[in-house]
Amino acid sequence: MQGYYRLDTGGGDQNVRVRRIFGAVAQFGTPLSDDPVIFLKPPEAITWEGEPIRVPAGETALFEGEVVAAIGREGREIDAAHALDHVSAYGVGLDMTLERFRKNREEGVPWAMAKGFDTSACLSRFVPAEQVVDYRQLSVELYHNGEQKQLGNLDDLVTPLPELIAFISRFIALEPGDLIFTGTPPTPGPVASGDTLLVRSPGLAEATFTVA
């Protein structure tokens, strides 16, 4: 459902309005620069489990499985040591990306269409942050048509989540309802009509999506 994420309260789902969606590039392996490279997706790009992923005509889309952190407390210039106090929930998602992103990045032109097209932000249900003892122990797995294609642990992020939150908040004050896609492990791959994508973090959340 566009513009909202679902929070599992233990007694049913609560729909939480999303304000902004942040993502970080090259969070596993070799960083692109000394500072995190951040992009935005519109809340209208959100897709829930059971809703189809729609790839724009003539384009190729890539899957990127990620753990997603939801901000529940406002903050500006947040200290990394206290950054996780601002996280209210965790889930998993797909940062669907058009293949043209690679060329856009090389040419230094905007990524808005490649990262923000309709249905490009696929989300699972979220669980309250207090259920996560240590975010660094979370892993993310992506299965493409039943075959595992991605596996990564958040302990291996180039920019750890607390530092990522601190960096973003230096420039943009974070508010309840903001989401942060933490980064995708190697290796994103292309999808085709009818493909099924399962993204999961064992013990946390999972969701399955089909490409229209």
Image (tube, rainbow, N blue to C red):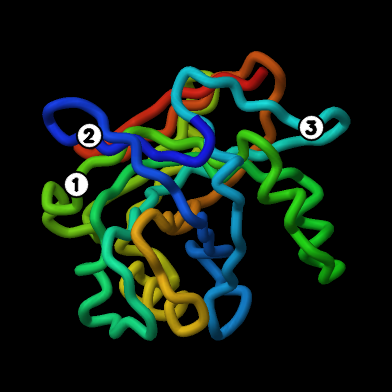
- Left or right of residue 9: residue 21: right
Q: Crowdedness of circle 2 by 10 Å Cα count: few (<14), some, many (20+)?
A: some
Quickly name the residue at label 1: 128
Q: Quadrant of residue 34?
A: bottom right
Q: Are marks 1 and 2 in contact (CB under 8 Å)?
A: yes
Q: Crowdedness of circle 1 by 10 Å Cα count: few (<14), some, many (20+)?
A: some
Residue 190 pos. (x, y %):
69, 34
Q: Are marks 3 and 1 in contact (CB under 8 Å)?
A: no
In the foreground, 182 or 110: 110
- Left or right of residue 177: residue 12: left
Quickly name the residue at label 3: 56
Q: CA distance from mark 3 to mark 1?
A: 34 Å
SS of the residue at dot 1? strand
Disc nearest the viewer among 2 and 3: 2
In the picture, the quarter occupied by the C terminus is top right
Q: Amino acid at mark 2?
A: Asp
Return the mark for residue 8: 2
In the foreground, 8 or 189: 8
Count of residue discs:
3
Q: Amino acid at mark 3?
A: Pro
